[in-house]
């Protein structure tokens, strides 16, 4: 499965402190998706299933948050240490809402992510009065304390902001705060998930939403990056987008066809569909060469 792979995108856990209304782990922000079980991968799983030679061939690993926050994984620091032990030059990235654990844990993470290109993405959607409107159950003060503890080690931090109607006026102020806190990057974008979700979520798009007409020209991230996605159960998928579409109970009318295949079969099927110009809808939305996509970065500023 890892032959010729250069990047592994890893979801080490399905546990999360937040109830973001457009996340596949819940149903419109309420209740756990019945397709999901609460589970975390221990470091022993990686020791037993990924050998040192496979790690040495990698350029990067990224701990992503498809349905869980990587910081929720009890053994995340040990997992990172395991990979770095066998490949000190490996680039390590992480995505989080920043509202978990304590300042000491984040300081330890910062010291671990000591490579020149290592980084942690903090998904912070606004300021103190707005972040919780989408990142529900996430405490602002805790995010600020944890981010500052991490940054104080000298590690690189990115502030990624999803823009909605309720926070669109705060983009520049959030960017300034990110600069003052010594974040490395600030980026802001909207979301294309309005094609699957209604506006009955207590949030609204930043302006009138019109779904783009997703074409069939695909620039496949998996093929471009030679990557693979590993979920919290130890299953491999072509990419995180397919895994999310497979699990999500919302928007099945758009991507329900993906559930006709298991994770292993999808490795062959997505290539067949790209070749015959009949890609899955999720491929067109995630990797389609389409103008007008809201998920394209609107602001992308290097701060230091």
Image (cartoon, rainbow, N blue to C red):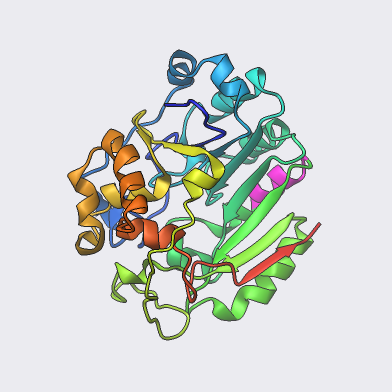
Q: Which residues are magenta?
A: 145-153
Residue 73 shown left or right of residue 170 in the figure: left
- Which quadrant would the C terminus be assigned to in this image? bottom right
Front-most of 290 and 122?
A: 290
Q: Which of these two is toward me, 260 or 119?
A: 260
**Residue that appears at 42% across and 52% down:** 18
For image coordinates 58% across by 16% down, the residue present is 53
Image coordinates for residue 231, horizontal then vertical, percent: 38, 36
Name the residue furthest front.
276
Q: Is residue 151 magenta?
A: yes
Relative image position of residue 240 (x, y in whole percent): 41, 46
* In this view, 209 is above or below 179: below
In percent of width and height, residue 61 lies at: 57, 35
- Residue at 54%, 20% (x, y): give it: 54
> Is residue 168 located in the magenta-colored stretch of the structure?
no
Name of the residue lying farthest toward the bottom: 208
Q: Is residue 58 above or below residue 219?
A: above
**Can I make out residue 34 in this image?**
no
Taking 301 as reference, is 249 left or right?
left
Is residue 224 visible in this depiction of the protein?
Answer: yes
Residue 91: quarter of image: top right
Quadrant in which residue 118 is drawn: top right
Number of numbered labels in the structure image: 0
Where 80 falls versus 261 (above or below)?
above
Q: Quadrant of the N terminus?
A: top left
- Is 247 in front, or is 143? 247
Magenta-highlighted stretch: main secondary structure?
Answer: helix
Residue at coordinates 36% horizontally, 52% vertically from top-left?
A: 274
From the top left corner, tell me how far across and down residue 99 is, in percent. Answer: 53, 49
């Amino acid at each position: 499965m890892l032959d010729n792979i250069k990047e592994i995108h890893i979801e080490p856990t399905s546990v999360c402190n937040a109830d973001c209304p457009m996340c596949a782990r819940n149903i419109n922000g309420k209740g756990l998706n019945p397709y999901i079980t609460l589970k975390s991968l221990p470091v022993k799983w990686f020791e037993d299933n990924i050998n040192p030679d496979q790690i040495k061939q990698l350029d990067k690993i990224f701990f992503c948050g498809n349905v869980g926050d990587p910081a929720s994984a009890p053994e995340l620091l040990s997992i990172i240490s395991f990979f770095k032990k066998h490949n000190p030059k490996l680039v390590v990235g992480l995505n989080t809402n920043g509202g978990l654990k304590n300042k000491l844990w984040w300081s330890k993470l910062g010291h671990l992510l000591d490579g020149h290109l290592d980084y942690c993405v903090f998904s912070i959607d606004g300021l103190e009065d707005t972040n919780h409107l989408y990142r529900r159950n996430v405490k602002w003060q805790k995010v600020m304390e944890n981010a500052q503890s991490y940054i104080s080690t000298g590690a690189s931090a990115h502030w990624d902001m999803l823009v909605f109607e309720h926070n669109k006026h705060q983009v520049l102020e959030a960017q300034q705060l990110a600069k003052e806190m010594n974040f490395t990057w600030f980026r802001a974008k909207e979301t294309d998930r309005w094609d699957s979700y209604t506006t009955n979520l207590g949030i609204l798009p930043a302006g009138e939403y019109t779904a783009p007409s997703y074409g069939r020209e695909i620039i496949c991230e998996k093929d471009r990056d030679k990557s693979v996605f590993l979920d919290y159960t130890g299953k491999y998928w072509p990419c995180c987008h397919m895994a999310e579409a497979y699990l999500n109970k919302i928007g099945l009318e758009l991507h329900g066809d993906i559930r006709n295949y298991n994770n292993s079969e999808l490795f062959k099927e997505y290539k067949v569909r790209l070749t015959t110009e009949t890609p899955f809808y999720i491929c067109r939305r995630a990797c389609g060469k389409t103008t007008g996509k809201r998920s394209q970065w609107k602001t992308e500023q290097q701060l230091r």
